[in-house]
Amino acid sequence: MSDFRNIVILTGAGISAESGLETFRASDGLWAQHRIEDICTPEALARNRPLVLDFYDQRRAALDTVQPNAAHEALARLDREWQGGLLIVTQNVDDLHERAGAKRLLHMHGELMSSLCEGCGGRAPFGGAMLDGTQCGACGGADLLRPDIVFFGEMPYEMDRIERELRRADLFVSIGTSGAVYPAAGFVQSARHYGARTIELNLEPSGGSHFFHESRLGPASRLVPEWVEEMLAS
Ligand code: BV8
Ligand code: ZN
């Protein structure tokens, strides 16, 4: 553990599960009620805007009812105390990493608490509901705001920065993700190709478990604090 300098951490819905937010692929998960292609695509937004806006309004409102858990807190502590390079790349659109205090963080699939204007492309912090009508603060356009969420078929955010960080990482840790969606699911292979050690912390084996040097199974609220202790003690 002692010779690591630069760490990249990828998180998925599993790190927020113990906070009470549903994951995507659990049997009672988010997609149990809706098919992905009916909600999380530009076509769905064009075809059935109210359904998509309401789906994200409900998930945005739910954020008020949940708190970061021990896993989010542990990553925020690592962010504060780790002297080397560190970047948390989250696939999650919730704000639990921020609320736990993480700073070196990016949301590659967007954020519930942000809006994207289809008129001027402006992104801005957003609370409340979109279904009731919106106005863009930048261009003044009415009802042009959509959820600032990366839909299927859309380019994730900050891919250049992620690629740069994967190149210089000597440790890649994947937490709470099924490894079902690309390009995020391919990061472990890139990291390994660039010579990083790769560890998976997950409740069950994921789609990419065989790419990891080490895979620890269990709840994130136990595994992540344990792993952070190890890193800071090394
Ligand atoms: C892109 C935001 C290209 C929305 C998300 C055909 C048509 C179109 C596209 C494709 C296609 N075939 C392939 C693709 C590419 C596609 C893709 O990968 N599809 C899959 C289904 C095959 N990807 C894309 O479209 C991406 N964009 O490719 O662009 C491009 C190129 C050039 C130019 C332009 C475009 C964009 C994908 C982003 C989609 N948006 N989210 C929202 O949040 O509502 S995806 C969403 O699912 C998440 O963000 C995440 O990325 C993904 C996977 O979810 P997970 O986080 O892993 O959650 P999941 O429930 O799956 O798993 C939870 C895990 O946690 C489990 O393993 C479980 O065991 C574990 N767990 C549970 N509890 C705990 C736990 N672990 C620890 N502790 C616990 N307590
Ligand atoms: Zn605008």
Image (cartoon, rainbow, N blue to C red):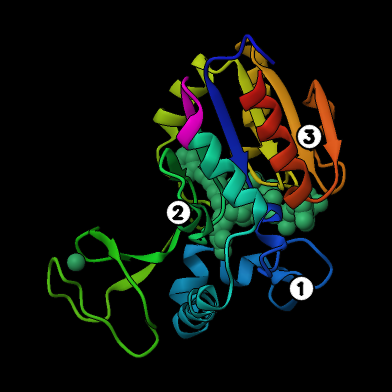
Quadrant of the frame with the N terminus: top right
Q: Secondary structure at mark 2?
A: helix
Q: In the picture, residue 118 is in which quadrant?
A: bottom left
Identified by mark 1, the residue type is: Ala
84 within the magenta span: yes
Per the model, the C-alpha gap separating discs 1 and 3 is 23 Å
Identified by mark 3, the residue type is: Gly
Q: What residue appears at the point 54 percent right and 46 percent down from the top-left corner?
A: 90
Q: Nearer the viewer, residue 161 or 67?
A: 67
Residue hosting label 2: 98
Tell me the tag on residue 208.
3
Tell me the tag on residue 32.
1
Nearest to N terminus: mark 2 or mark 1: 1
Per the model, the C-alpha gap separating discs 2 and 3 is 27 Å
Identified by mark 2, the residue type is: Glu
151 lies above or below 176 = below
Residue 49 visible from this viewpoint: yes
Nearest to N terminus: mark 1 or mark 3: 1
Per the model, the C-alpha gap separating discs 2 and 1 is 28 Å
Nearest to N terminus: mark 2 or mark 3: 2
192 within the magenta span: no
Q: Secondary structure at mark 1?
A: helix
Q: What residue appears at the point 47 percent right and 58 percent down from the top-left corner?
A: 99
- Residue 130 is left or right of residue 101, and the answer is left
